[in-house]
Image: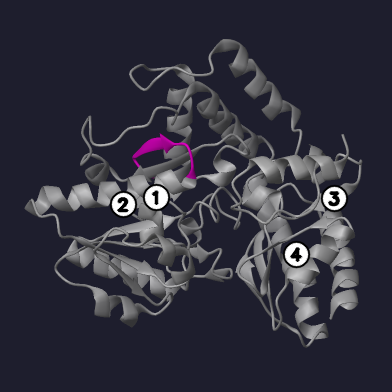
């Protein structure tokens, strides 16, 4: 079957919620993807920051295959060995106390919101608590996650959303302080905003939030779904700041392709949930947990966090060159292997041209090119990306 036939069949049968690029991917190897025609693409999107290990890692693949042959699914009415192993590794790496496995990042956000509300309810038996979220944030597309997503274009068609959510300006502590009342139960934010344009939080902002949360017994929730799992040069981004949250969400590279997310919490907060407060049919099943467990093993064996630290300056220097060279390239922002180039024009045509030249890039908003490659990329891969990007920019600008 030809590529265009696959595209036509897909468009006829799927609900149209994505504008997909006109290629049909078939396989992957290392940091490259291949379409059904055999064309090769250097991947600097990693399935939107998911495939940290690169494609076709044999050790990872074998762990998944082995689990399929043993037990794919049971229910959360029972224990199973991959669950114990995965939970222990997540707790150790996150420096939290307990974890709940979900099917996605969006579900992790839902669980974090519920946990914060239950913690507040236990204190005063009231149900009118408020959450402060950030403008230009992105936390997911379910109704609860949309409610704390600071972008009106995502929210408007689906109102009314859950109530009691206020929005403050990211990196402006005074803006947050103005929103706090005696009903505030939690503050939620991404340590590095992703969809909002790759904006890292400042140390002063996070320290200020931690201080006020401690003073008023407000829970601090960090969304590490995209910026976590080694992407910024530490296992989780908050660890570079030294500002620990009370609840943290994770997903994407947590399973490196197997759908799994999680929210973790410190013990006094985690203890708010009792049996019946939350649940999931598929979350934390043996297949997902086997993936999570092996991902942490491979992060350690491959020294991936150290690898990101050692090579992030090289990526940043290469991207900074475009800022100096082209007037339309306004700024570079980010940490580690989570970088963004802001342009003065929409980046859609640049991404399309790069795809034509064999480079996969994604955007963050309309005018930012987002770079979230597999964490195994080398300096040679970065050089190849920069070379293709240069040709792309020259042909479009």
Asked if one can make out residue 34 in the rendered structure from this viewpoint, the answer is no
Q: Is residue 97 magenta?
A: yes
In the rendered structure, are the residues bearing label 1 and label 2 in contact, judged by CB atoms less than 8 Å apart? yes
The alpha-carbon separation of the residues under discs 4 and 3 comes to: 19 Å
Q: Quadrant of residue 56?
A: top right
Asked if one can make out residue 282 in the rendered structure from this viewpoint, the answer is yes
As drawn, 35 above or below 201: above
Taking depth in this image into account, of 167 and 352 the one nearest to the observer is 352
Residue 89: x %, y % from top left: 48, 34
N-terminal-most mark, 1 or 3: 3
The alpha-carbon separation of the residues under discs 1 and 2 comes to: 6 Å
Residue span colored magenta: 96-104
Instruction: Name the residue that disc number 1 marks.
Output: 109
Q: Quadrant of residue 99?
A: top left
Residue 315 badge: 4
N-terminal-most mark, 4 or 1: 1
The alpha-carbon separation of the residues under discs 4 and 1 comes to: 31 Å
As drawn, 86 above or below 203: above
Residue 78: x %, y % from top left: 36, 16
Label 4 element class: helix
The alpha-carbon separation of the residues under discs 2 and 3 comes to: 39 Å
Q: Is residue 45 left or right of residue 200?
A: right
Q: Which residue is drawn at the image coordinates 91% and 41% (left, top)? A: 37
Residue 113 badge: 2
Q: Which residue is drawn at the image coordinates 55% and 56% (left, top)? A: 227
In the rendered structure, are the residues bearing label 4 and label 3 in contact, judged by CB atoms less than 8 Å apart? no
Instruction: Name the residue that disc number 3 marks.
Output: 41
Q: Nearer the viewer, mark 4 or mark 3?
A: 3
Q: Which residue is drawn at the image coordinates 60% and 29% (left, top)? A: 294
Label 1 element class: helix
Q: Which residue is drawn at the image coordinates 90% and 60% (left, top)? A: 357
């Amino acid at each position: 079957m030809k590529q265009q036939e696959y595209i036509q069949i897909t468009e006829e049968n799927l609900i149209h919620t994505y504008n997909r690029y006109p290629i049909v991917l078939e396989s992957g190897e290392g940091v490259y993807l291949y379409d059904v025609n055999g064309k090769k693409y250097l991947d600097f999107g990693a399935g939107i920051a998911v495939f940290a290990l690169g494609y076709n890692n044999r050790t990872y693949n074998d762990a998944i295959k082995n689990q399929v042959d043993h037990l794919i699914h049971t229910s959360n009415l029972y224990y199973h060995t991959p669950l114990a192993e995965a939970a222990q590794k997540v707790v150790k790496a996150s420096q939290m106390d307990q974890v709940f496995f979900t099917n996605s990042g969006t579900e992790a956000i839902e669980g974090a919101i519920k946990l914060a509300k239950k913690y507040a309810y236990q204190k005063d038996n009231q149900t009118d608590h408020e959450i402060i979220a950030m403008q230009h944030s992105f936390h997911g597309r379910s109704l609860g996650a949309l409610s704390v997503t600071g972008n009106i274009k995502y929210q408007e068609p689906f109102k009314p959303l859950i109530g009691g959510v206020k929005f403050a300006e990211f990196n402006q502590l005074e803006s947050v302080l103005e929103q706090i009342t005696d009903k505030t139960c939690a503050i939620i934010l991404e340590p590095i905003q992703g969809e909002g344009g790759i904006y890292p939080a400042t140390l002063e902002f996070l320290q200020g939030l931690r201080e006020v949360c401690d003073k008023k017994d407000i829970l601090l929730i960090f969304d590490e779904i995209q910026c976590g799992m080694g992407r910024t040069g530490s296992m989780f981004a908050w660890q570079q700041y030294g500002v620990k949250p009370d609840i943290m969400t994770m997903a994407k590279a947590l399973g490196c392709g197997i759908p799994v997310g999680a929210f973790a919490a410190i013990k006094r907060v985690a203890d708010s949930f009792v049996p019946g407060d939350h649940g999931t049919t598929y979350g934390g099943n043996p297949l997902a947990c086997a993936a999570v467990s092996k991902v942490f093993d491979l992060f350690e064996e491959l020294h991936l966090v150290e690898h990101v630290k050692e090579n992030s300056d090289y990526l940043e220097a290469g991207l900074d060159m475009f800022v100096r060279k082209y007037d339309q390239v306004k700024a570079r922002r980010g940490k580690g292997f989570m970088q963004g180039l802001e342009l003065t024009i929409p980046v859609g045509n640049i991404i399309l041209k790069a795809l034509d030249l064999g480079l996969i890039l994604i955007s963050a908003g309309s005018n930012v090119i987002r770079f979230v490659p597999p964490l195994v990329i080398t300096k040679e891969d970065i050089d190849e990306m920069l070379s293709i990007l240069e040709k792309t920019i020259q042909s479009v600008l």
